[in-house]
Amino acid sequence: MSSDSTKKTISVALGVCLVCSVFVSSATVALDSVQRQNKKLDKIKNILQAGNLTFNINNAEEIFKEKIVPVIVDLENGSVLDKSKYTADLNPESFNIKSLSESKNYGKDILPEEDLGNIKKRPKYMLSYEVLNSDKQIEKYIFPIFGKGLWSTMYGFIALNKDLRTVEGITFYEHGETPGLGGEVDNQNWKASWKGKEMFDEKGNEVLTVLKGKVDPNDPNKNKQIDGLSGATLTTRGVGNLIKYWMGEDGYAKFLGNIRKDI
């Protein structure tokens, strides 16, 4: 083969490689953008589901913008962070529980004796959501929650009525629990059973319990109890513990206390 032919062959091969690499890079960027958008939409749907809001796949983002007001809560004192103090990492658009938990500036190590959710670290601030009615008055509050199950950390949302006592709904949008057992946290009937349950009594004491078994319909405390997940004792325990943690003093209790002063 002549020297010129070899050069042409190499040039063509390099050209093909260059075109392919550009195509692959472009496809990767486009796919990454789609995946980010899908993840964002999935989280929005879970927030709306937890708040027991009516929506469909086509109007979820519109309903979210219309009815949901994100606020960043300082868990140390229960205050709402003023927008003037937002940073590149600490704002509703970029808020990331995982990265903030690990952050030197925004993360907090949890004392073992206080770590009911078995999460070891959490953000000092949490992004929460106010749900507005047609008169632009707050009718519900939605709170991110997370904690260990059997195999994974479960991430979700729980919503309370404006009375701050009654559960409106719960969802889990990310977990790695055993399908068919711990994966029952995705069961629609089980999630629906949370609506109307009593999270706090009239004095603000946390009273809701996730049982190991089924709620006895004749038990006078049935409205303060949730069915356990059949065959998933450790996942059930994890759900109960993470609820106790996030509704407790190291979680949203101070924020809830501040709101109760105005009720």
Image (cartoon, helix red, strand yellow):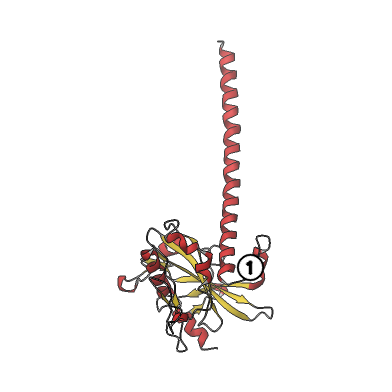
- Residue 97 makes an appearance in the image: no
- Residue 105 horizontal/vertical position (percent): 42, 66
Q: Is residue 168 left or right of residue 237?
A: right
Q: How many marks?
A: 1
- Residue 186 makes an appearance in the image: yes
- Residue 164 horizontal/vertical position (percent): 52, 82
Q: Is residue 130 above or below residue 47?
A: below
Q: Residue at x 58, y 32 (%)?
A: 18
Looking at the rendered image, the quarter that the C terminus falls into is: bottom right
- Residue sitting at the far left: 113
- Residue sitting at the far top: 1
- Residue 75 horizontal/vertical position (percent): 45, 76
Nearest the viewer among 263 and 187 is 187
Q: Quadrant of residue 233?
A: bottom left
- Residue 180 horizontal/vertical position (percent): 45, 57
Return the residue at label 1.
Answer: 64
Q: Is residue 221 above or below residue 142?
A: below
Q: Residue at x 59, y 14 (%)?
A: 4
Name the amino acid, label 1. Answer: Phe
Question: In the structure shown, which secondary structural element does the residue marked by tag 1 occupy?
Answer: helix
Q: Residue at x 39, y 63 (%)?
A: 232
